Image (cartoon, grey):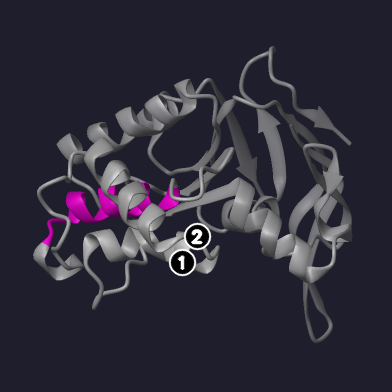
């Protein structure tokens, strides 16, 4: 369960204040699949950063499985992010001089997993996303869609319970976009919680429910949403 309690995010520049996220209460149950849509500058990336334990709110609390994320010491917060949260980015963020299998091993290396385990797990994950014949290819030797699939495999390396996806189909052609959305649906069916920020309304329709973020305020689409206005 992911919960936001009266969360606000304010950026200050000299005498000016920009409210990136208004006071918001939100519950995302374990296993949910939520799409967040909204125009550029509406606060979507800010919200994702807050949910991902990367940017503390100005006010309020974020709880993951009942634990107040930003009340944790920095080291424990980093460990929580490493163990429980997987990130998918529009730009993939692959390391260019590493092969596909080496890129997937990076989170396990940082978690100090056994080398043999890293190798076996990375091969298994690349096979899962259909890249068993691209293990030794570097990013420049892969298509854009294949790079995104390597990024998906890497995201799964530490078996996260929650996936945060920032425009995961933004750089993809329609066929590859559909493939990525199928993978996200599969990951959700395995019990993982997914929160996806997207401009793509067709991608948003793949989620179980959609929230709209405009000018820092979240609005529910449909009466069954668990969103609560503060």
Q: Position of residue 200 (x, y in %)?
A: 38, 39
Chain part drawn in magenta: 142-155
Q: Examine the rendering and report whether any part of residue 18 can be seen.
A: no
Q: Examine the rendering and report whether any part of residue 114 can be seen.
A: yes
Q: Position of residue 223 (x, y in %)?
A: 69, 13
Numbered badge on residue 109:
1
> Do labels 1 and 2 touch, CB within 8 Å?
yes
Question: Residue at 46% of width from left, 21% of height from top?
Answer: 189
Q: Position of residue 118 (x, y in %)?
A: 38, 56
- The N terminus appears in which quarter of the rendering? top right
Q: Is residue 87 above or below residue 174?
A: below
Q: Is residue 74 left or right of residue 151?
A: right
- Residue under pointer 2: 113
- The C terminus appears in which quarter of the rendering? top right
Question: Residue at 29% of width from left, 65% of height from top?
Answer: 102
Query: Between marks 1 and 2, how big is the CA–CA gap?
Result: 6 Å
Q: Nearer the viewer, residue 123 or 92?
A: 123
Dot 2 falls on a residue whose secondary structure is loop
Q: Position of residue 35 (x, y in %)?
A: 53, 34
């Amino acid at each position: 369960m992911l919960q936001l309690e009266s969360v606000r995010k304010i950026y200050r520049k000299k005498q000016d204040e920009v409210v990136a996220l208004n006071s918001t209460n939100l519950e995302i149950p374990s296993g949910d699949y939520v799409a967040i849509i909204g125009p550029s500058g509406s606060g979507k990336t800010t919200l994702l950063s807050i949910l991902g334990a990367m940017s503390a709110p100005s006010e309020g609390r974020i709880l993951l499985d009942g634990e107040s994320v930003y009340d944790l010491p920095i080291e424990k917060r980093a460990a929580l992010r490493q163990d429980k949260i997987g990130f998918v980015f529009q730009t993939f963020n692959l390391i260019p001089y590493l092969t596909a299998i080496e890129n997937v091993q990076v989170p396990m290396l940082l978690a100090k997993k056994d080398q043999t385990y890293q190798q076996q797990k990375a091969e298994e994950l690349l096979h899962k996303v259909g890249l068993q014949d691209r293990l030794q290819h570097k990013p420049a030797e892969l298509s854009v869609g294949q790079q995104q699939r390597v990024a998906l495999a890497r995201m799964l390396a530490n078996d996260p319970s929650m996936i945060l996806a920032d425009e995961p189909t933004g750089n993809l052609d329609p066929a590859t976009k559909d493939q990525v959305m199928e993978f996200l649906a599969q990951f959700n069916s395995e019990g993982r919680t997914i929160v996806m920020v997207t401009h793509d309304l067709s991608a948003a329709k793949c989620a179980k429910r959609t929230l709209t973020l405009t000018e820092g305020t979240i609005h529910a689409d449909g009466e069954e949403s668990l969103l609560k206005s503060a």
